[in-house]
Amino acid sequence: MTTAPTETRIRILDAAERLFMANGFEGTSMRQIASEAEANLAATNYHFGSKEALLQAVFKRRLEWLNGERLRVLDAMEAEAGDQALKPSQIVDAFFGTLLRMGNEPNQGGQTFLRLLGRNLSNPSDMIRTLFAAEYSDVLERCKNALYRSLPEVPKAEIVWRLHFMLGATLRHCRHRRAGSGDRLASFRR
Amino acid sequence: MTTAPTETRIRILDAAERLFMANGFEGTSMRQIASEAEANLAATNYHFGSKEALLQAVFKRRLEWLNGERLRVLDAMEAEAGDQALKPSQIVDAFFGTLLRMGNEPNQGGQTFLRLLGRNLSNPSDMIRTLFAAEYSDVLERCKNALYRSLPEVPKAEIVWRLHFMLGATLRHCRHRRAGSGDRLASFRR
DNA sequence: CTAGAATTAAAACGAACGTTTGAATCAAAC
DNA sequence: GTTTGATTCAAACGTTCGTTTTAATTCTAG
């Protein structure tokens, strides 16, 4: 299926991620990206096809890892819980905690990506919106079901609303976060 | 000095304000602005000289009104207070309250402008930064001095820091505010 | 070794961009 | 009624953009 990512492909992804975050999508040119990645201009279109597809790939790389990690955390939690329902705080931590912990690991582009995420999801384009719908459906469905089971007395529609609000608050946080402030969950524990 | 603003000049300013807010500076073209303002493309450069100068004019129009209003509020407060120092809450309301009340008046572009403000001041360009330094110096100096007098026991450097933090929080609020939520000061009274 | 994928280089494409130009239009002042 | 200055208009300018093409080169697996 997908071939192993090449060295240049990764350099282009990293450069695009950083430049999109710093200057926005329209404010970044393919020539800037190629130059920053020390790659040829044609290589960007060779690997990704178009500028929009490159932005998609930037998001997809991180979201695949992130949502995979979320599912792995849920797996571990449910294995330990046996047939008991998870605690709501566990589910919230699997979903939001995993996201926020992404920005803590040094030597990673997680910090840059989180801010790019916050920047682009405030006014998402149709493209970004559909990409997220596809990429998030699995983990979102699973978290919702876990919450239904964990909070049987709360109407399902209410749970969906609460998730919406938490997502909005988290994106707000991502958009304005600055590097090096330590515990990313602190602002959610008050 | 400055001639009375022409009808088209105002239409261009309004259109630019709304489009810059919706699509960002790089994401908005002069042709879009001219079309939305039902003006000729050349009229935009005739009235403002360049795209950057147009963005500056968008900010300047609102900031001149805003800072003038702030000074008027301070004048009225000090006239009533006689030779007594103003209360800190009064100064804060003159500075931040006036800003936030700007978005409450219907039939005005204040709401749009506040969000444009929040959007552009998170990563301000050099141009925006210098414009703000010039436009804000008067009212900021006066508010700082009023706070020094109002809080003589607090070190001046500490007052400056607190102002910085309040400005940051306010811009965060402006960036994510949505229309029609009523009292703009509610989130500051908790 | 060889075939195929990956990369570089240089050039060009049409489209859209910000900007400029020069003539046409209009409103008042003389 | 003509002149003057401000404003509007259609058209074009040069530049940059995303993208494509062609060819030559390097890397890598069978």
Image: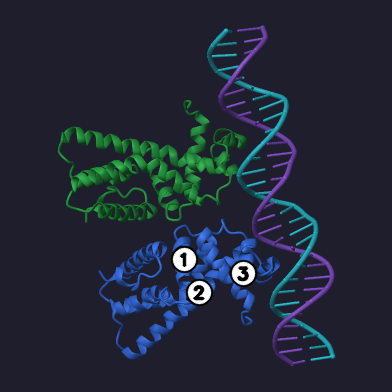
Chain colours: A blue, B green, C cyan, D purple
Both on one chain, marks 3 and 2? yes
- Disc 3 marks which amino acid? Ala
Residue A190 vs B125, above or below: the answer is below
- Residue B116 falls left or right of residue B90: right
Residue at 55% in and 70% down: A58
Residue assigned mark 2: A62
Distance from disc 3 to disc 2, alpha carbons, whole Å, reads 18 Å
- Residue tagged by mark 3? A37
Mark 1 or 3, nearer chain start: 3
Task: Count residues near mark 3 (Cα–Cα under 10 Å), then give few for <14, some for 14-19, many for 20+.
Answer: many
Three-letter residue code for mark 1: Leu
Q: Find numbered disc 2 in the image and state the secondary structure of the residue it sits on.
A: helix
Percent of width and height locating residue A172: 38, 62
Residue plotted at (62% across, 74% down): A9
**Badge 3 sits on which subunit?**
A
Q: Which residue is mark 1?
A: A117
